[in-house]
């Protein structure tokens, strides 16, 4: 049989939250003139005033300064806007190549990027919103997150009141949040029973009650 355009499966753009950021991300795309570079430049301009810096100096950091850039990118006040910029730039580049999404799915920071792509609000408003959200969340006490390869019901048996399930990503994959010591203790308990887990590259206990004080100011 001959495949036709009508046989193509639907295209979904999946935009994640923070945790996989690194200095130099997207540099190769940025070096080629086009939609990706134009988008990064435009969003960096929107973000410069609320952030007090040019986000491009961290996203596109040269190898000689990548250690310092990585340290700054680990600060959620910077991480969230950086991830937001990359996600929108990539989505617009796919569109420019003729790949249009039938569906948009986002998690955390990715939800704001999908909202822009769906026309919910403008890039400028989104940049101000994401910078404010990131600043308010960064002001909360430091914490940690752990991805656990087990069902939520299984994980709950190893939790106490200091750690909570903050996301359920699949039937056998969830994320827990809490302060550093309690997450370390949980990791030790999970190791003893051979439950696989991964520490996430985050600075706070996101998507948990630790973020409650940020809610009213953000609203």
Image (cartoon, grey):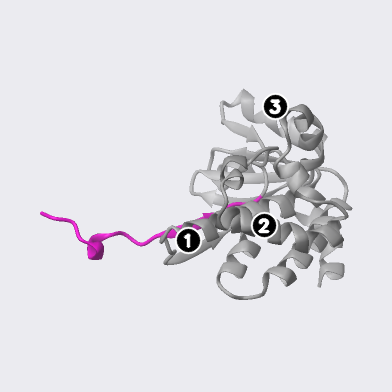
Q: Residue at label 1?
A: 96
Highlighted range, magenta: 1-17
Hey, which residue is sitting farthest left in the picture?
A: 1
Labelled pair 2, 1 in contact (Cβ < 8 Å): no
Pointer 3 local density, CA inside 10 Å: few below 14, some 14–19, many at least 20: few
Residue 10 image position (x, y, % from top left): 35, 62
Q: Residue at label 3?
A: 188
| In the image, residue 118 above or below residue 44 | below
Can I make out residue 182 in this image?
A: no
Labels 2 and 1: the sequence-earlier one: 1
Residue 69 image position (x, y, % from top left): 78, 37
Q: How many marks?
A: 3
Q: Residue at label 2?
A: 109
Pointer 2 local density, CA inside 10 Å: few below 14, some 14–19, many at least 20: many
Residue 136 image position (x, y, % from top left): 85, 59
Hey, which residue is sitting farthest bottom in the picture?
A: 120
């Amino acid at each position: 049989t001959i495949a036709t355009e009508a046989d193509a499966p639907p295209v979904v753009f999946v935009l994640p939250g923070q945790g996989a950021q690194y200095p130099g991300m997207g540099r190769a795309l940025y070096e080629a003139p086009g939609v990706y570079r134009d988008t990064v430049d435009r969003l960096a301009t929107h973000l410069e005033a609320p952030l007090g810096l040019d986000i491009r100096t961290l996203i596109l950091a040269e190898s000689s300064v990548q250690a310092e850039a990585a340290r700054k990118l680990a600060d959620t006040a910077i991480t969230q806007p950086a991830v937001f910029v990359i996600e929108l730039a990539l989505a617009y580049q796919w569109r420019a190549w003729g790949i249009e999404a039938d569906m948009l799915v986002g998690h955390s920071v990715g939800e704001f990027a999908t909202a822009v792509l769906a026309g919910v609000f403008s890039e400028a408003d989104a940049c101000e919103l994401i910078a404010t959200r990131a600043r308010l969340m960064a002001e909360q006490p430091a914490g940690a997150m752990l991805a656990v390869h087990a069902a939520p019901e299984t994980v709950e048996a190893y939790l106490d009141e200091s750690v909570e399930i903050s996301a359920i990503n699949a039937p056998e994959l969830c994320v827990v949040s809490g302060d550093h010591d309690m997450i370390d203790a949980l990791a030790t308990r999970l190791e003893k029973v051979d439950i696989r887990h991964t520490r996430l590259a985050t600075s706070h206990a996101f998507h948990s009650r630790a973020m409650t004080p940020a809610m009213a100011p953000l609203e």
